[in-house]
Image (tube, rainbow, N blue to C red):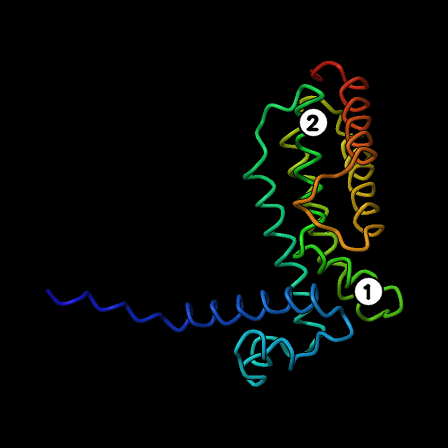
Amino acid sequence: MSATPTPRRTQAERRAGTITSLLDATVGCLAERGYAATSTAAVCAEAGVSQGALFRHFPTRQALLVATAEHVATRNVEAFRTTVGADVDSVDAVVAVLARLREVVLSPANQTWRELLVAARADADLRAALLPARESLQAQMLDAASDLWAERLPADDLAAVLSIVVNMLDGLAFSALDPDPTAAPGRTVERALRLLAEMIVSHYPQEQP
């Protein structure tokens, strides 16, 4: 019996595949090499794509980097949503949510954001170019937090609590010389996560009407 021939990909599918390869290669380069060494040539070598093909999809290096940040943000929020349940009423449940979010923040892919945000401090053009991506990420995270805690936290407090959580976890990521999302957090971090969970649950003990 002859094998069924593999269907040929459409032009749109080939284009999407090339873009995904370039974005994933940029994620890898930023994590392994850092911002300064993530050149278009390095990305193309990693992706197995010509520079001509890269510039057909991304006219500048900056456009590629911003698109990569957006790609990582969407993927990370989706991954977080798929691994977190809806029942987060107890302290233990909130600790589990915070631990999962910590893994996302420490992930190699999320290193993309740390590299770009640090670089943007001294690059006004990059800072301005990243602003829509940062706003989109914040909106996606707020939506996820709302799905988890909208019945517990008042709307006016939701963004503030999210800011406390994210800034704490980002601080942990920046302070770790070699962050490993699979490593145990350590006693101090474990205690910090539990204290934060206890404060959230005790401050909002009942569902809001």
Locate residue 74, reporting x and y percent. Answer: 61, 52
Label 2, on which residue? 94
Q: Is residue 72 above or below residue 46?
A: above
Q: Which quadrant of the figure has residue 60?
A: bottom right
- The residue at the point 81 percent across, 39 percent down is 163
Locate residue 121, reporting x and y percent. Answer: 88, 64
* The one of 176 and 36 positioned closer to us in this rendering: 176
Q: Secondary structure at mark 1?
A: helix
Q: Residue furthest right?
A: 122
Looking at the rendered structure, the kind of residue marked 1 is Arg
- The residue at the point 72 percent across, 21 percent down is 91
Q: Nearer the viewer, mark 2 or mark 1?
A: 2
Q: For the C terminus, which image quadrant?
A: top right
Measured Cα–Cα span from mark 2 to mark 1 = 33 Å
- The residue at the point 71 percent across, 41 percent down is 102
Q: Secondary structure at mark 2?
A: helix
Q: Which quadrant of the figure has residue 10?
A: bottom left
Q: Which mark is residue 127?
A: 1
